[in-house]
Image (cartoon, helix red, strand yellow):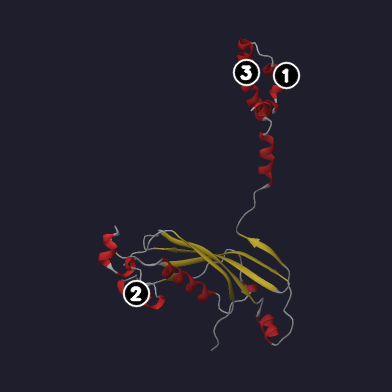
Amino acid sequence: MPARKLYFESIRVGDELPALAKAPVDRVQLSRYAGASGDYNPVHVDELYAKSVGMPSVYAPGMLVMGMLGQLISDWARGGQLRRYNVRFIKMVWPGDTVVCKGRVSDRHGSGGRYFVEIDLWAENQKGELVMKGGSQIQLFFSLEDENRQRSGQSPIVVEVPRESLVVPAPASASSEAASSAPTAPEEEDEGTDEPRNGASSKKTAPREKPAAKTASLPAAKKAKK
């Protein structure tokens, strides 16, 4: 039976990837990972050394957890091509911790016969604490028909798909609110200019008694003097 494949037409923004729960991390796994990766940093495999530098025990390399998140993507996006993958390490993973990898479709768009989805990724421990977060971009065939056409040397199916995203742009009302709040600035400046007027009368200096000082021209005049 052929492996299941994922196509762009079946994906919607907000779709969640099936969570991937890994077995609890143990010291044998850390040793095997060190051998496979060539990273023999003693803080990951030597208990005595880890404690000598202030750690309660050895801990998992961040790249091991990154690999777990990578497995989540590869298991889900069968038939797709990974175009970008990045992560940020948040919290250490210790022996005995269970890592659960999760993801959500945050963006989709297509143009010129090329179709992409953006995935928000994160990993949690058994306490629900965030240990890693990141994102990836996957390129997919639009449909099975599109895949068959391209594999046979024909042109791809072209469907212009406008960008759909979970990120909501700032509402237009926000700009109007910002504009409405602008007139309040002269009132604050007027209050501030009352003090220079009082001070100016006591010092008997003319420059600060100019009527134009009620606007933003007053700070500009001060900078010019400096």
Q: Nearer the viewer, residue 33 or 1?
A: 33
Q: Position of residue 135 (x, y in %)?
A: 54, 64
Identify the mark nearer the N-term, 1 or 3: 3
> Dividing the picture into quarters, in which one does residue 49 lie?
bottom left
Q: Residue at x 31, y 65 (%)?
A: 58
Identify the mark nearer the N-term, 3 or 2: 2
The residue most toward the left is: 48
For badge 1, the amino acid type reads: Pro
Which residue was labeled with disc 3? 196
Q: Secondary structure at mark 1?
A: helix
Q: Secondary structure at mark 3?
A: helix
User: Is residue 73 toward the left or the right of residue 22 in the image?
Assistant: right
Asked if the residues shown at circle 3 and circle 2 are in contact, with their CB atoms under 8 angstroms apart, the answer is no
- The label shown at residue 211 is 1
For badge 2, the amino acid type reads: Gln
Identify the mark nearer the N-term, 2 or 1: 2
For badge 3, the amino acid type reads: Pro
Q: Residues within 10 Å of mark 1 (few under 14, many from 20)?
A: few
Q: Give me the C-alpha separation between circle 1 and circle 3.
A: 12 Å
Q: Residue at x 71, y 74 (%)?
A: 113
Which residue was labeled with disc 2? 29
Q: Position of residue 67 (x, y in %)?
A: 45, 72
Q: Nearer the viewer, residue 118 or 221?
A: 221
